[in-house]
Amino acid sequence: MMLDVQALSELDYLAYPKYQSRVIAIASGKGGVGKTNLAVNLGLTLARRNLRVALLDADLGTANADILLGLQPRFHLHHVVTGQKKLPEIIVEAQHGLKVIPGASGLPELADLPERQRHSLLHSLLVLDGTVDLLLIDTGAGVGSNVLQFVRAAGEVLVVTTPEPTAITDAYALIKSISHYQIPITTRVVINNVRKKGEGDIAGQKLAKVAHQFLGKQIELLGVLPYDDMVQRAVRAQTPLVESYPRSPAAVAINTLAEHLWAGTPLTAGTSGGVKEFLKRILSLRVETAF
Ligand SMILES: Nc1ncnc2c1ncn2[C@@H]1O[C@H](COP(=O)(O)OP(=O)(O)OP(=O)(O)O)[C@@H](O)[C@H]1O
Ligand SMILES: [Mg+2]
């Protein structure tokens, strides 16, 4: 706890950079609904448009964003956590200059890391501030403390679900957890694996209605992605969908989704408080929950 408080004051001493990165977490209630595929392809789509994008693979249980990108990183978050490498040394560049921070599989929950390791891991992300326009965070499934900490600190979240009732129920549970926070979290929903026209919109609208009615929370339906065999073909070939099949229905839909996500946002400045604000929030969580 001491370390966290110290970190806050350390961060306060640092001058604010010219640009503040936007930080967006990608999360879901149910697992396997397409978060990592969305994170990778959305990141590439925005990077191709000359945005400076970093993708943090924060699925500390089963990290795999690098696999979808066909990367074979030598180092990953585990090396940062154990102090063997500094964050800039593990970053690998994918297509269009997308910076990937490879996750480590089998790391314990963030909250369960020894204080010093948790602190040094999170603090190391500070090097990204001002050097990227967007930090995308791919999280693991569910409403575990890792996921919620990342979502809360990011301030913006894309909740991914499929139209199936079980996935929608789990998405609702995640949104419910988010709605308990004092700070507002911009919550957008992406409905993936849609097989019938209109099915995604209906599911999204239902979710938005229930969230509004029972949680008083506004959520935006950001986009609907079709079920597309090319997604799995791209996964098997370890070549990202938007690169290998740019005209496939899912790639086209991700393009539209990226446009909507970035609409109205200046190219060099984000809307949230940047990586620094993200860190302040995530480092202060322990302090808050301790009382
Ligand atoms: N639009 C789609 N069309 C067809 N298959 C898809 C689509 N989106 C994802 N998939 C497939 O669904 C599976 C799970 O995708 P992905 O790994 O992105 O999910 P995830 O939410 O990140 O999973 P986890 O919760 O385990 O991290 C993969 O096999 C992927 O190819
Ligand atoms: Mg995943």
Image: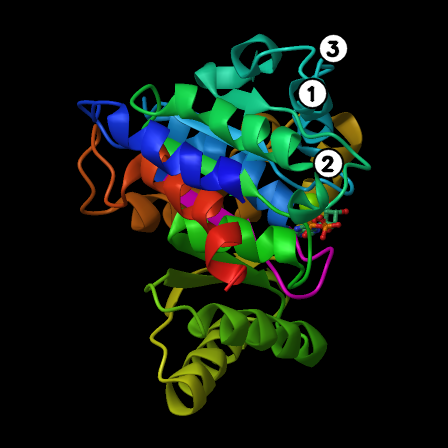
Give coordinates of residue 226: x percent, y percent.
Answer: 58, 57
Circles 2 and 1: CB distance less than 8 Å? yes
Residue that mark 1 sits on: 76
Residue visible at 63% across and 57% down in the picture: 145
- Packing grade of label 1 (10 A; few <14, some 14-19, many >=20) is many
Tell me the amino acid under the disc marked 2. Ala
Q: Is residue 158 left or right of residue 116?
A: left
Label annotation for residue 63: 2
Tell me the amino acid under the disc marked 3. Arg
Residue visible at 20% across and 33% down in the picture: 269
Q: Secondary structure at mark 2?
A: loop
Quadrant where the N terminus sits is top right
Way the structure is coloured: rainbow
Residue 92, placed above or below residue 195: above
In the depicted view, which residue is nearer to us: 173 or 114? Answer: 114
Quadrant of res 242:
top right
